Image: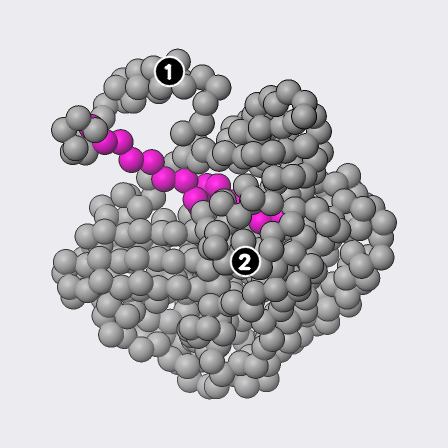
């Protein structure tokens, strides 16, 4: 047994696209323990939402995450609509599904490229990101935006899908299907991927359930769990689809789950286009609408997994409390378990395998422990507290 060392990964590290800290205990080249510390990227969005009207919050909730912005908007609008007992038109439900699945395609293709980059397979990275432009062009076509699409609104959707847009969608989906099937064959046969992904980052089915993993991370451990199937929302109860699972329990399985979900999403969008009902796309609500007293939990299956929004309304034009649980938070404990027993060199791809978004995840709250009450901190107090905290805890992780 060799001597153990602490190796910090983050909060600033080339393997991390956002600041977060993972403290690794290593014995030689092997990782024997991992402790995570989150909270480096807090933006105060939940508190900001309490000071804005429900309509104004549409803008801010979409900016929780750029890659899964539609998921957050869908989850938020569902919260408000349930609190108001508001039923949206059926055509709006189908359009929401189309945008949600286009976003899933975009997110998964983006991730495949990032995963290839993490293992040094930059040829695949450039190929996938080139074809990712197809889905971004389709989203721009129907929404006007390539990143934050702003399609859902309280009461329905902002824009309809015209016959011309439908034709372009079908053309683009055909290209995406062909390219994704090609990438699937690469991932199944290319040694560059197989040697860095097969048997790496093992998470058994039991561990996945006990550690509350979500999304592709959970389904890559053979657990058939998907909010779209388990607790259908918008039009998912009327659209046939398969919940993709693999029982390999490693990084390779997480790659394959996402690729197959892209192909499944393409089928779902085509089904929506074939069966979309006619009619209005939204019901009108007042700009300064009042939401009655209510307590609502809304769930959607974001590209990374189960996304939860929680609304408390005391009546009026602003939320009393709003809470967001992102999928990445559900996978933090799981990724720490995946890293144990592996090589230090595999840390970047294992971390990337959960497709982390730390800006969605991070929260921060200060308490006066002595008096057991929340403090109001000035900027100077926060600065002094931070300096003292790192002096006391240098080399440790809370």
Q: Is residue 396 above or below residue 330?
A: above
Quarter of the rendering occupied by the C terminus: top left
Residue 332 image point, x, y percent: 49, 44
In the shown orientation, is residue 389 left or right of residue 27? left
Identify the disc placed on residue 392: 1
Which badge, 2 or 1, is on the more N-terminal residue?
2
Q: Is residue 48 above or below residue 320?
A: above
Q: How is the image coloured?
A: one colour
Q: How many marks?
A: 2
Residue 137 image point, x, y percent: 63, 59
Q: CA distance from mark 2 to mark 1?
A: 37 Å
Q: What secondary structure is marked by label 1? A: helix
In the shown orientation, is residue 382 left or right of residue 255? left
Q: Based on the displayed image, in which of its 4 quarters is residue 155 positioned?
A: bottom left
Q: Based on the displayed image, in which of its 4 quarters is residue 221 positioned?
A: bottom right
Magenta range: 353-368
Count residues near mark 1 (Cα–Cα under 10 Å), then give few for <14, some for 14-19, many for 20+: few
Count residues near mark 2 (Cα–Cα under 10 Å), then give few for <14, some for 14-19, many for 20+: few
Q: Residue at x 64, y 71 (%)?
A: 264
Residue 127 image point, x, y percent: 77, 51
Q: What's the magenta bit mostly, secondary-structure-wise?
A: loop
Q: Is residue 187 above or below residue 236?
A: above
| In front: label 2 or label 1 | 2
Q: Residue at x 60, y 52 (%)?
A: 203
Identify the disc placed on residue 227: none
Q: Disc 2 designates what residue?
A: 206
Residue 153 image point, x, y percent: 37, 64
User: Which residue occupies the foreground of this view, 353 or 74?
Assistant: 353
In the shown orientation, is residue 82 left or right of residue 344? left
Q: Residue at x 67, y 23 (%)?
A: 2
The answer, for residue 41, to whether it is visible in the render is no
Q: What secondary structure is marked by label 2? A: helix
């Amino acid at each position: 047994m060799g001597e153990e060392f602490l190796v910090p990964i983050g909060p600033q590290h080339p393997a991390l696209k956002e600041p977060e800290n993972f403290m690794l205990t290593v014995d030689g080249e092997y990782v024997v323990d991992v402790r995570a510390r989150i909270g480096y990227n807090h933006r105060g969005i939940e508190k900001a939402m309490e000071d804005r009207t429900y309509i104004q919050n549409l803008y801010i909730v979409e900016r929780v995450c750029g890659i899964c912005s539609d998921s957050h908007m869908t989850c938020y609008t569902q919260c408000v609509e349930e609190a108001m007992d508001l039923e949206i038109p059926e055509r709006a439900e189908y359009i929401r599904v189309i945008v949600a699945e286009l976003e899933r395609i975009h997110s998964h293709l983006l991730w495949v490229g990032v995963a290839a980059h993490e293992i040094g397979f930059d040829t695949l990275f450039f190929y996938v990101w080139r074809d990712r432009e197809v889905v971004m062009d389709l989203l721009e076509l129907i929404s006007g935006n390539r990143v934050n699409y702003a399609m859902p609104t309280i009461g329905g959707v902002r824009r309809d899908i015209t016959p011309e847009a439908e034709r372009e969608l079908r053309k683009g989906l055909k290209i995406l299907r062909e390219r994704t099937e090609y990438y699937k064959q690469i991932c199944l046969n290319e040694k560059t991927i197989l040697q860095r992904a097969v048997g790496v980052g093992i998470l058994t089915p039991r561990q996945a359930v006990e550690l509350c993993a979500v999304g592709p991370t959970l389904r890559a451990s053979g657990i058939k769990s998907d909010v779209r199937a388990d607790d259908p929302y918008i039009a998912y109860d009327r659209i046939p689809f398969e919940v993709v699972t693999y029982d390999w329990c490693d990084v390779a399985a997480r790659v394959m789950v996402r690729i197959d979900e892209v192909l499944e999403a393409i089928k779902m969008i085509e089904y929506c286009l074939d069966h979309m009902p006619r009619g209005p796309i939204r019901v009108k609500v007042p700009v300064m609408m009042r939401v009655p007293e209510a307590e609502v939990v809304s769930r959607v299956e974001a590209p990374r997994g189960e996304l939860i929004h929680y609304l408390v309304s005391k009546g009026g034009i602003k939320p009393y409390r709003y809470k967001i649980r992102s999928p990445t938070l559900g996978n933090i404990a799981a990724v720490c378990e995946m890293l144990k027993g592996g090589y230090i060199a595999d840390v970047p791809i294992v971390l990337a395998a959960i497709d982390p978004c730390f800006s969605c995840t991070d929260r921060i709250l200060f308490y006066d422990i002595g008096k057991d009450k929340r403090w109001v901190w000035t900027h100077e107090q926060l600065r002094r507290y931070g300096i003292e905290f790192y002096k006391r805890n240098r080399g440790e992780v809370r």
